[in-house]
Amino acid sequence: MSEQSARNNAAYFEEMYEKYATDVLRVSYFYLGDRQKAEDVTQDVFVRLITNSPELQEGREKAWLLKVALNRCRDLWRGAWLKRVVLGSPTFELIPAPDDTERKDNEEAMMVAIHKLPETFREVILLHYYQGYGISEIAQMMELPEGTISSRLSRGRKKLESILEGGIEQ
């Protein structure tokens, strides 16, 4: 690799990191519920960007990075050492005001319920409602049709409602 090419790659990597590291970290954190593991996933994603150096279409970089992050999170989630219920939301790190306790309890119950969902529903619920991604963005990220994402959101909401009502133990 020439010195100029190496500089271009370093500049590209730095640009990608500046633009998308926060998004990768946020998605990883919401998926795993553990800041340290989310930081590890973020690092893994950008190491993979450097080592594999894929030719990404312009405008698809974020989708590729988030897809790699989701895949890495799935691997960690499936690992035997992470077979537990994880609470995870930046709002849980804040100390609630006394009048905020009920809201916090509801948020915790919601996150426990979300983590009881099957993976296919949990991912789209977290990406859509907690990360604010649109259906088309999630479809691009997961390389699935938009109709599939819409269906998973709808079915995920129904399952979530059943879990919250105590009707289904997942």
Image (cartoon, rainbow, N blue to C red):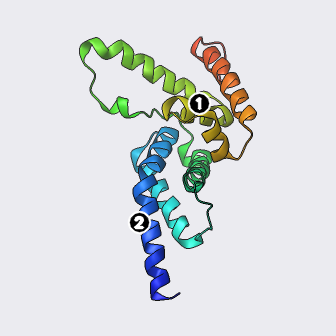
Is residue 129 found left or right of 15 in the rendered image? right
Considering the image in quadrants, where does the C terminus appear? top right
Residue closer to the observer: 170 or 68: 68
The image position of residue 107, as x and y in percent, is: 44, 21
Residue holding disc 2: 14
Q: Residues within 10 Å of mark 1 (few under 14, many from 20)?
A: many
Identified by mark 2, the residue type is: Glu
Is residue 74 found left or right of 12 in the rendered image? right
How far apart are the two marked residues, 2 and 1, measured between alpha carbons? 30 Å
Residue depicted at 71% across the width and 36% down the height: 146
Q: Secondary structure at mark 2?
A: helix
Residue holding disc 1: 125
Is residue 136 found left or right of 43 in the rendered image? right
Identified by mark 1, the residue type is: Ile
Of badges 2 and 1, nearer the viewer stands 2
Quarter occupied by residue 122: top right
Residue depicted at 73% across the width and 42% down the height: 144
State whether residue 2 is above or below residue 85. below
The image position of residue 67, as x and y in percent, is: 61, 51
State whether residue 117 is above or below residue 39. above
State whether residue 90 is above or below residue 66. above
Residue closer to the observer: 17 or 85: 17
Q: Residues within 10 Å of mark 2 (few under 14, many from 20)?
A: some
Quarter occupied by residue 17: bottom left
The image position of residue 29, as x and y in percent, is: 46, 43
First in sequence: mark 2 vs mark 1: 2
Q: Which mark is residue 109?
A: none
